[in-house]
Image: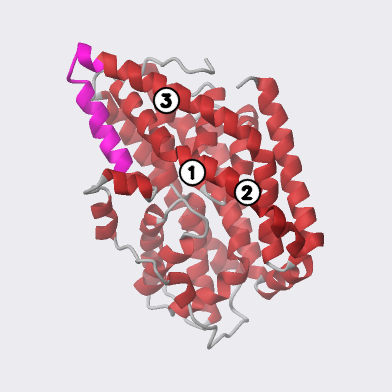
Amino acid sequence: MSQKHSLFILYAIITGVISGIITGWFFGTTMLKFSWMGTVFLNALKGIIVPLVFTSVVSSVASLGDIRKLGRLGGITVAYYFVTTSLAVIIGLVAVNIIKPGANLHFNDVGSADAIINNNEIATLSDILISMVSPNLFASAANTQVLPIILFSVLFGAAFTTLEKQGNTVNEFFTGANNAMLKLVGWIMYLAPLGIFSLVSARIAKAGGGDAFLKEVIGVGLHVATVLSGLAIHFIILFIILFFIGRRGFSYLSTMLNALLTAFGTASSSATLPITMECADESKINGKVTRFTLPLGSTINMDGTALYEAAAALFIAQAYGIELGVGQQVIVFITATLAAIGAAGIPEAGLVTMIIVLNAVGLPTDGIALLLTVDWFLDRFRTSINVWGDAVGAAVVDRYTSAALPDVETKNK
């Protein structure tokens, strides 16, 4: 996609976000009539996730030539994800301990969390590991379970590197298929302004419009302020990492705005993945790095979700008057990090995995009801941080591995 078209779409998306907030605020439920546009946009994005992930990871790994090079690429990627997710959780814990948003609430009964966890299985660490190996990849694809598809794609691509000439032929096929998928992403991007406008306005309308939304925010205002402050701090830390380690700056951020605004509008890092990959290509990130790190990051690198779950757990503890010591907060740190890995890249999935964190330190799961009124609002911000973390990771990994990885042809290069 040309820079001219990218800028046009960026300005159109910004207009869509602002217009969605204003119309949802003032016109309320009337805007629900236009929700179908958001559904079409989301369906278009979700429909290409599986083929995009499969072709991008297979072609990326297969084009390495020597599968031993994947060790450096994979090692740096996983190390970055672990460090930044840990930083996010620490920021969330520190912010709650300083601000103490739930200290004056004194809730004894906040209702039931059954509506949240109904029909959802709470994943343990062993469940996450088991889910990486699917007995039926087609079923995983149908349910958009990306992690087993990524693992299979890595092994499938690695197998091609052992086939010499036959492997080169298959590599060319998957590289061409991936470029075609990226072209399709560019076409779908023209739907983004209307789709994001519809999603934002409809979500505010469902909250009851402007007045009802304000009442919800005021009720747990300090919690909202704490989470947003933590996310803002983590955003800045990620930018510092980008600048000093990734050696990129504001131009990279501006290129990624399409992805960040799409993440805000859709509240889904998985649905935003095609846009993130498109923006990374426009930023001249090595194609192999883009196609390996971003699909993996959209699945396991959830900085915003990890920060939110740690902050929310301590907020619930404070609201119930339960004191969590250093040891228990360490448990929150560990479980929030692991739970973020298990969180699906879909709207409000963090509420489900939060049960893991609450159970780990004996907090009442009914406390989740405290978060319902504003979770959808905070979800948009934490999803944007999730995507920003992935984008910064791609830049960092690119700097330290691209010299050893000959680039591939993409439609933007």
Which residue type carries mark 1?
A: Lys
Q: Which residue is mark 1?
A: 46
Look at the image and give the residue range highlighted in magenta: 148-167
Q: Is residue 235 left or right of residue 350?
A: right
Instruction: Work out how far the residue at label 2 is from the one at label 1, CA to CA, in angstroms.
Output: 12 Å
Give the residue furthest to the right: 26
Q: Which numbered tag is attached to residue 38?
A: 2
How far apart are the two marked residues, 3 and 1, measured between alpha carbons? 16 Å
What residue sits 47% from the left and 18% below the top?
410
Residue position for label 3: 178
Q: Position of residue 358 (x, y in %)?
A: 41, 72
Q: Earlier in the sequence, mark 2 or mark 1?
A: 2
As shown in the figure, which amino acid type bears the numbered disc 2? Gly
**Going 60% across and 59% down the picture, which residue do you hit?**
378
Q: Main secondary structure of the magenta part?
A: helix
Q: In the figure, is residue 256 to the left or right of 330? A: right
Residue in the foreground of this view, choosing between 120 and 239: 120
- Work out how far the residue at label 2 is from the one at label 3, CA to CA, in angstroms: 26 Å
Q: Earlier in the sequence, mark 3 or mark 1?
A: 1
| Picture coordinates of residue 270, whole percent (x, y) | 47, 45
2 or 3: tag closer to the N-terminus = 2
- 144 in relation to 275, above or below: below
Question: Of the residues shown, which amino acid type is indicated by label 3?
Answer: Asn
Q: Measured from the top left, where is residue 253 in percent x and y?
A: 62, 33
Circle 3 packing at 10 Å, graded few (<14), some (14-19), many (20+), is many
